[in-house]
Amino acid sequence: MRNMIKKKPGEFSWVTWIKKRIDHNLNFLSITTGPTGSGKSYADMSIAYQIDKDFDVHKQVAFSFTSFMKIINGFNGDDKELSKKKYKVVVFDEVQVTASKREWQSKVNKLFNYIISTFRHQNIIVLFNSPYSDFVDINTMKLIHAKFETRGWSKKRQKTAIKGKILQYNDKLSKFYEHSLFVINNGKVNKFSGLWLLPKPPEHLIQPYERMKTAFTQRLNKKITKEIEEMEQGLNSDDNDNKQELNPESMQPAIWEEAQKGYSNQEELKQRLSKKLEREVDIGQLNRNITSMRKKGYDIRQYKGGVSNFDKF
């Protein structure tokens, strides 16, 4: 059975199973899910540390597709230290930012799916994490071998409890199946159905990770702010583009100019226009022009109730 391993003293059973895949010339992809603050990232780093005691946060934690590819290229020879590792582990933090369902058709996400579906022979271990698995594109999820759900952090024990399941996708039925891990111990086969209590990763991993996560979050916030500003500018630009030119031969330009100064009612606006145009303005004519202006995208109502300088005339 592919989901069965022999208990190895001093090693977590899930770690033994992951290493078994690599030893059999396979790769391993998992996703760790759970609410914000439930210990997903620490759990993945702890798993990585259990697999490779020389796990390097600076070189083996990715927050974007670009940094992920740099790590993969490092395993393939760009980095001498990474390329020499027997167990090549990557922690891809907050993968939904790159591989979301809403953006999966983008060029980057297509490339991402292509990469993780073709590097089996490289025997790489990728530990993804995301709040929920359905935040991630279905095409990415089809390639995942195991799912770990965080069940909480024990402050007393300083451990994260996770529930692990082996995933299998049936393309004919378009359905995912979950399987348990079976462990042979003392000649007996037992189903691993309990929680995996993962110790907190060591401080020499936590400290640089927190600095990297903070820097990533700040960059992401700035990017989001910039995109929102561009969207707002675009909306304002669209509003301006949709405006038709006011009739220069009519009183409309004068109405718009006076209204922007603020006015309390149309009678006041009528008096100010009469003084400005040096002729008596008919209230009916004023109302017809105001209606026409509104259809062209010039709505003077936004200035009603504003500061008026009429008393100074």
Image: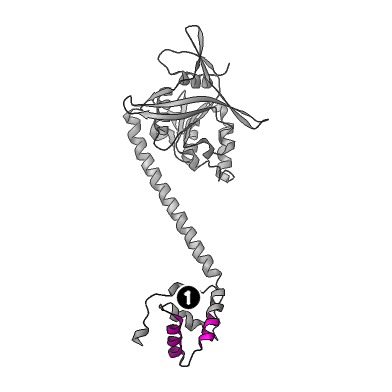
Image quadrant holding the C terminus, namely bottom left
Picture coordinates of residue 277, whole percent (x, y): 46, 90
Report the front residue among 281 and 233: 281
Picture coordinates of residue 73, whole percent (x, y): 50, 34
Residue 114 shows up from this direction: no
Report the front residue among 66 and 265: 265
Residue at the top extreme of this rendering: 187
Local SS, label 1: helix
Q: Is residue 147 above or below residue 62?
A: above
| 69 part of magenta stretch | no
Report the front residue among 221 and 187: 187
Residue at position x 46%, y 20% in the image: 194
* Label tally: 1
The image quarter containing residue 210 is top left
Badge 1 crowding class, 10 Å Cα cut-off, few under 14, some 14 to 19, many 20 or more, is: some
Which region shows up in magenta? 263-289
Residue at position x 59%, y 36% in the image: 139
Picture coordinates of residue 224, whole percent (x, y): 45, 51
Picture coordinates of residue 239, whole percent (x, y): 52, 67
Three-letter residue code for mark 1: Ile
Q: Main secondary structure of the magenta part?
A: helix
Residue 226 shows up from this direction: yes
The answer to whether 111 appears left or right of 218 in the picture is: right
Q: Is residue 229 above or below residue 190?
A: below
Residue at the right extreme of this rendering: 172
Image quadrant holding the N terminus, namely top right
Residue at position x 44%, y 83% in the image: 269
Q: How is the image coloured?
A: one colour
Residue at image mark 1: 300
